Each structure stands twice: as structure tokens, then as C-alpha cells.
Image: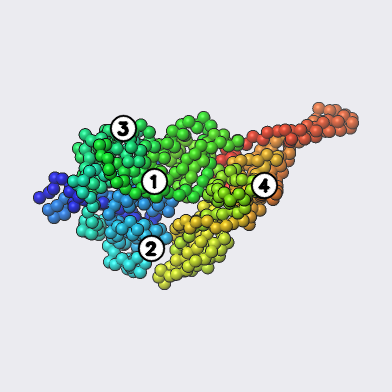
Amino acid sequence: MKLVRYFSSYIRNFCIVAHIDHGKSTLADRFLELTGTKLTGSQVLDKLEVEKTRGITVKAQTVTMEYTLGDCQYQLNLIDTPGHVDFSYEVSRSLRAAEGAILLVDATAGVQAQTYSTFFQALDANLEIIPAVNKIDHPSAITEVVADQIYSQFDLEDPFKVSAANGKGVQELLEAVIARVPPPKGNPDSPLRAFLFDSWYHPHKGVVCLFKIVDGSISKANKVKSLNTQKVYEIKELGLNRLDFQETQELQTGQVGYIILNMQEVSEAMIGDTFCLAEEKAIEPFPGFQEPKCMVFAGVFPENPGDYDVMQKALAKYNLEDRSLIVQKDISAALGNGFRCGFLGLLHMEIFKDRLNSEHQISVITTSPSVPYKVELKSGEVRVVDNANDLPEKFHIRTYYEPIVETTIIVPLEYMGEVLNFCLSRRAFQKEISSIDSKTTLMSFEIPLSEIITDFFDALKSFTKGMATLDYEHRGYNEADLGKMTVLLNGESVDALNTIVHRSDAYNKGRAICQKLKELLPRQQFELAIQASFNGKVIARQTIKAYRKDVTAKLYGGDQTRKDKLLKKQKAGKKRMRNLGNIEVESSTFAKLLSNSKN
């Protein structure tokens, strides 16, 4: 006999966690087919255009499925999560809505750097972890070796062996979720307590909030209250997300569903907020999510200055579903009105730019990425500075500090020496080297974050032939010999190009930026000096020679006196232009320059 109502004992909330490209979204497709939720299509949970283009999951997605086992019908809420380190915040939110997790490992690649981080996140969340080895039908699969790795590294025995591509072993894995993942805890007779763990903007429905109903139940007739803001909302619609919205009359204890409230501003949907019925007085809120710490900052300016207002509205909607993004208004003498944005990493920044372009048709220029430094002033005050233009004068600063990350690199044994030398060249401190198996090595370093946010991973992949994987966690700040590098055009600072750099890198970076400016800037009718200075001392210079106009072309004959007078007058005019001229750099030139400076 099938149940009509889904009591919490017949609900399973689970997610899939893994390193990037280990098959999470493909496994989700097989689950959707097995439960009859969808019949055709691939990676249907990757809904964003940028996800389809890049082939990676950027945003966690939730879908509700039904599956009959024996005489019972279960409701399964599957949360597909990203695998890249830059989107770990999406993973942490997903884990809060689940009671179990499938830890998926690629049979051709084995345990990778982010396999560790996702495993420990699931472990810290007290989830039931079910190990699985994917791609067992691949010609280069080493299934048993990978199974041994999972046991030796995580103490998880007998992983399920599946092929998400053709469905082999998927039904057994899904039924193991029902058998091993505990049902959600909660009291259906208690007052409503629901926590908001995701939100997004729908063009027709407005702000859509995704809730987990922990205690009690909620229906469309109810009014609800945010414990964070104390605002009361009417419910316009609620239901389950089965790839499309399926409206229902009620959401019960343990269920995950969407609710559309009469929110006037997208900022009202605060991730981690607790909601209760409007009339309730003494409801204990859930602990909120730990706020993500942005570790890469950049100025973001519209290529077309007229797009500023449109961009401001687009960022408000974007921020609704990506609360890890920090947005503040900014202004640059070189680029005009824009925003100072904080990102979790460089891929996060690239995805942000792609989505603004594809979803809102806004092209942007981003300044060189920076990390949040700390400076201790002689007065004893400590400031966090992520923009070189906000750095106090040198004579006010006692000590500089830079952020440090603990970096885990997994690489074939044959590349261990090259990786060690490469990391040491990036001011790394070696912490640990250990073996995963006879062919694979785990290496751990402490490295300044500024050394890995640009070309570190690309270079690592290049000389290891794509075999290395990388993960990192923030480990506080260390004292460092830092300073401000200023770029000058004819003695005038170009604020969009100023950066904070380590003294050991200052000369090479200053020389490189001057050379690129010389290649990109057009010649003027006066000599143009390009300089880079570190802490006020010029360390590099290039000069763009002036156009030489032939002012004597109109003269005939050999009157040298008249020629000399014209040349002397031209020289004096160029001197005035150099002193008074305003060098204007086109947006397209800045875009090329800043793009090159990040390579």
C-alpha cells in the first residue's frame, strides 16, 4: 500500500559530493530517469548557460523524486553540488539541507584534492556518507585500486561500483540511499520552523525561496515571519521542485520545497534565515551559515558607461542567488563608475563575468585581481586593504600581512620534484609529503594566496600534463615585505593599474606592465613616459616617442634660419603638451591590458 502523505520517515534528503568532473551531474541524470522524473536529456540540473558552455556545475540544484521500494513510496530530495573549490560555499549550503551524501570518485583518476575537502565537509556536517566509484566501464578504469584508496584515506569500506554513463549499479546505489541515509529529524506537531538555504530570481514569479521544513508544516493560507528581520509575508505559492515548479497545498516536516513570498526586494531573502508562523513568539532560530570569505577582489566596470544603471539592477538579482559575491560601489578616474567586487576565487570571477554577459548582455572590464591584505599602522590600528588605492601612506604603516592558504596537491610520483621546485619558487613553505598509493603523492604547502590566484593552477597543469589536482583552505595571515606599485603616465597615477605586490616581485611586474603599456598605447604628438614605482621609488620605465611632424615641408629653398625657427617652436610646443596634455586611454585598451596582466 502506497502512502498518500510523505511522513518524514519516508523522506530522504541527500546530495552528491565529489571532485570536479567525477560524474555528479551524470549520476543525477540516471537517478532522474530511474525515478521517472525525466525521460530524456543530459545534465538537466545544470540549468545555467555558463554551466552548459563550460561543462561544470556552478550552482547547487535541488529536485524532488519519488521511488517505490517494496510497499512504500519514498520522496527523495536530491541536491547536485559543484565540485570546484571556488564554489565550496554552494556545497556547504547543500549539506545543511541533507542527512546523507554520496561520495563519488572517478575510477580513472582516483582520489583527488577536492575529494578530501568535500569528504571532510560532509563528515563535519554529520552526514551518512555512502562511497561510490564511478566510470567503472571506462577502458582506463582502475576500480579496485580506487576502492583501496577510498578505504585507506577515508576508512570507507565496500564502495558501490557504478557507471553513471550507462546506468550500471545505479539502482543499487539509489536503494542504498533509502536504506542507509536516515530520515530527517523533526517534530510534525511542533510550531513551524523552516530554514532558507537557497534563493533565486524568476522573471515571472519574482523571488523564489528554497526551504527545508524542519518542524511543523506550512500551507498557502499561512503567513510567515523572518526571525532575522521580523518581517511578515503572505505566501503566494508553494510546492516541490520536480525540474519544474509543482504547486502543492502543503509542505510537511522533512520536506524540501519552494515558497514564493511577497518580497519587495531581492535582498530580503537572506540565506540561513529561519522562518516561522507570523503569530509565533518564542521560536529558536537555526544557527546561520558561516559567511563565505571572499579572497579575490577586483574592480568591475561596464565597457559601455551607459550600462551602469542596468548593471546595478543585474547585480542585485545576481547577488540573490550567489551570496558569496560582495558588491560595493566604486569609481575610477580611468574607467568611470563601477563596482568593487569580492569573489571566492578566479573561476568565480570568470563565471560572474560570463553570466553578466550571457544573462544580462553586459560586457565588463575587470581590474587586476587582488587579495585582502592587512596593515598595522604605527597608531596600533589594523586595517584590511583589498585595493591598492586605499593603502595608507608608507610612513603610517608599521607592518604588512598577507593571507596564507594551505594547499593540497595530488600528483603522480614522477612529477613530485618539479612540483616541489615550482611551489618553492612561489614562496611556499613545505608542510607534508605522503603517498596515497605506489604511484600517487599528496603534497601539502603553505603558500601566499597572491601567488596562486592568477596563473598558478594553469602552470601546474601544464608541466604535469594535466595530472595534478589542487585544493586549498585559508590559514590566516603572515607578516610580509609588501608595498604599493603605482603605474604613472607622464607622472600621473593610473588608479586602475595600481597593485599591492611583494618586494621580490616588484621589479619584474613593474617592467612587464610598462612594456605592455608601450605596446598597447597609441603614439601621441608628444613624448609619453610610462613608469612603475614601488613605495614611491621608480623601478621601471618605458618611453613612447612622439610623432614627428615635418613642419618644414612647406618651405622651399635653403633658408636654414627659417627651418631652425620652426623646429625650435615645435620643440617648445611638444614640451607644453607633455606637461599639460591629458592622456586618455580607451576602454578597449584597458580591457586588453588588464586581460594580458592576468596571464
User: Which mark is on residue 262?
Assistant: 3
User: Which mark is on residue 51?
Assistant: 1
C-alpha span from label 1 to label 2: 24 Å
The spot of residue 441 in percent (x, y) is: 45, 67
Left or right position of 561 against 179: right
Name above or below for residue 492 compared with residue 2. above
The spot of residue 89 in percent (x, y) is: 39, 50
Q: Residue at x 56, y 54 (%)?
A: 401
Q: Residue at x 35, y 45 (%)?
A: 272
Q: Which image quarter: residue 17?
A: bottom left
User: Which mark is on residue 376?
Assistant: none
Mark 3: amino acid:
Asn
C-alpha span from label 3 to label 2: 46 Å
Left or right position of 380 against 203: right
The spot of residue 356 in percent (x, y) is: 45, 38
Q: Secondary structure at mark 4?
A: strand
Left or right position of 525 against 557: left
Q: Secondary structure at mark 1?
A: helix
